[in-house]
Amino acid sequence: MLLPQARFSALRALRAARTTPAIPASTSALARLLSTLAVLEQRDGKLQPSSLSAIAAAQKLGGPVTAFVAGAGIKGTSAAEAAQIKGLEKVIAVENETYEKGLPENYAPLLVENIKKGEYTHIVAGHSAFGKSLLPRVAALLDVQQVSDITGIESEDTFIRPIYAGNAILTVQSTDAIKVLTVRGTSFQDVTTTGGSASIEEGSDPNTPLQTEWVSEELAKSERPDLGTASRVVSGGRGLKNKEEFERLIVPLADTLGAAVGASRAAVDSGFVDNSLQVGQTGKNVAPQLYLCAGISGAIQHLAGMKDSKVIAAINKDPDAPIFQVADVGLVGDLFEAVPELTEKLKQ
């Protein structure tokens, strides 16, 4: 039986399907005129997962797909890596240390310059911190409206995106000449990273005056899988009471499973972990094969970021906690007893 929230989402999706029939991009007349630019995110010469999501979405639109990447010495690293991705026609590369850190104030004029030169109809980037900072500025400079966090493509101008923390699904049709899109990484992942033969071309660099200067950064390094792409995630919430208990219980369980560590916003706000590990509407969207959480009640904002997980397992002492409404497996009990016992049994 569908819960009220699920029924509402299902009804909205059904109504959208009836009123806006899907038009396969590859068979429509407009698809032949499409030209899509996938904006790639790189760090230290290596493409980030959001780049692959952008390319996957661009390929679903139909028409030729061009990738764009900028930074220091990228022609022999990230640009060459992108050229191997199957389905790309070419890679536009701009080598300039100014764009290495992807500062949106400096990067946006560069991207707009190349968009106008290439006359692209669609601009796609991942819905990561990079894409969410950059593309709104690009859309403003192009005087068009951005469509954010899309999870589906119905046609060249019609897209699916969640609203109200994922409790309703919206079908959006854009009439702008240039469509600017950010895409949810968990919804676009089918990319073949080898076998491609895209050419690498020099992009246009307007060399506009810099608006922002890079000073420094402090990164939390970990040997664990990346939270956004991990196949297993172990998350902890406010029920763990403090940072010491979080590290004592959640971290060993995650290491035993070879999983990434996540947390609810309440745990992050309480200082248990760094905010880079936050899962939810204002954190990261994850869709692992296994999402195991302890001490998380299941606020709607948290559910929005993890309810697409294949298997959800929850431990909470409150039998009425909302997390049990979405969990495939639930254990009502004291996490301070259950988590260490589970960790020991997994080790055995």
Image (cartoon, grey):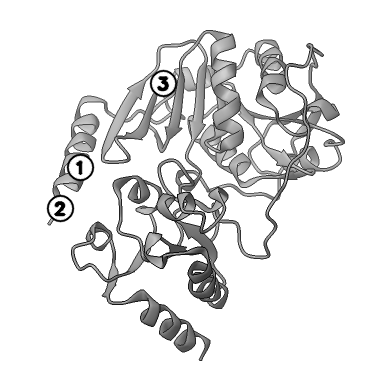
Residue at the spot 68% in from the left edge and 54% down from the top edge: 220
* Residue 165 versus residue 264 in the image, above or below: above
Residue at the spot 39% in from the left edge and 53% down from the top edge: 306
Q: Quadrant of residue 316?
A: bottom left
Quadrant in the picture for the N terminus: bottom left
User: Callout 3 environment at 10 Å: few (<14), some (14 to 19), or many (20+)?
Assistant: some
The residue carrying mark 1 is: 10
The residue carrying mark 3 is: 157
* Residue 344 versus residue 329 in the image, above or below: below
If you read the primary sequence from the N terminus, does the residue marked by circle 3 or circle 2 appear first?
2
Residue 338 visible, this angle = yes
Residue 232 visible, this angle = no
Residue 161's x, y, as percent?
Answer: 37, 33
* Residue 71 versus residue 6 in the image, above or below: above
If you read the primary sequence from the N terminus, does the residue marked by circle 2 or circle 1 appear first?
2
The residue carrying mark 2 is: 2
User: Callout 2 environment at 10 Å: few (<14), some (14 to 19), or many (20+)?
Assistant: few
Q: Which amino acid lies under the numbered mark 1 shown in the image of this protein?
A: Ala
Q: Quadrant of residue 292?
A: bottom left
Disc 2 to disc 1: CB gap under 8 Å: yes
